[in-house]
Amino acid sequence: MNGREGQSSTAAARYTLPPSRLACEDILFCIDVDPESLVEMKNTSVTGRPFTRLESIKQAILLFINAKLAINPDHRFAYFALGKSPFWLKKEFSSEVDSAIAAFQGINVDSSAGHADLTHLFRVANHEAKKSRAQNRILRVILLYCRSSVAPHHQWPTTQKLFTLDVIYLHDKPGPDNCPQKVYDGLVDALEQVSEYEGYIFESGQGLTRVLFRYMCLLLSHPQQRCVQDDIDIPKSLTKKSPVVDPAPADQECVPVSSQ
């Protein structure tokens, strides 16, 4: 950080951060529509029916959009789905929440989805990022991935980094038929290869919607204003701590006080 002032020996060293304006974001959601997106979460609706991963992802995206627009109403959103390959759900970037709801209505689970090729997604993101830059905006892709045994693959040059990639990975517990660690490693590789700014990746095999919502809230952070993921120390624990009582000195005598 530059801008150091106060070279005098009598003045304390001060650091200033030059003022700058954060670019508005164009955010492209990519939702996995593999059959594993229909795996049930542990939470249930008011009717007692468990939510699926896909239903929980839709709720989390709506939570994100409303919160992001409350921060800055000029952010915009578009929607992709990932079957065997990615495809558009809603191509036009919009700041309207109703646009997300309309995009969700076009989601159909792809029963034939097997491998996951992210190359087309990155090509589209690269193209959209150039249009965003022409408007003094930046592009971010948020990938919501649900496959426990299928690692994504892509072909992309390391020299092209025009957008930022965030990932939320919901998966089953490790078992004989799946290896979420291998999938996670593949997602990390993709993130590190394509991201312009610091990209975040979160994973959960717990099946809890509150964990998904917590991760989505962490993604509200602007890519131009992020710390590295290892330094994230939020949310803070709400566990009550016992009050610290200063012990009396060992040599202090207890002197009775008379009421007279």
Image (cartoon, rainbow, N blue to C red):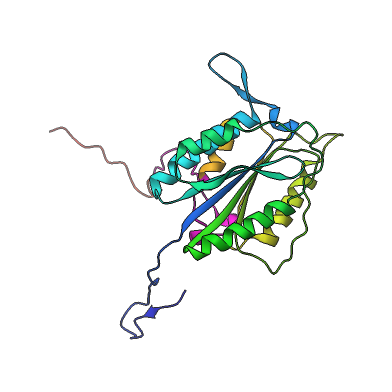
Q: Position of residue 190 (x, y in %)?
A: 72, 56
- Determine the residue located farthest toward the right in the rendered image: 176
What residue lies at 43% left-to-right and 61% top-to-bottom?
22
Seen from the viewer's position, the closer of residues 242 and 143 is: 143
Tell me: residue 130, above or below residue 53: below
> In the rendered view, does 87 fall on the left or right side of 61?
right
Residue 239 visible? The answer is: no
Q: Position of residue 155 (x, y in %)?
A: 78, 58
Q: Position of residue 40 (x, y in %)?
A: 68, 25
> In the rendered view, does 246 fall on the left or right side of 76?
left
What residue lies at 34% left-to-right and 48% top-to-bottom?
252
- Determine the residue located farthest toward the left in the rendered image: 260
Q: Quadrant of residue 214?
A: top right
Residue stretch in magenta: 218-245
Tell me: residue 23, above or below residue 115: below
Seen from the viewer's position, the closer of residues 91 and 170 is: 91
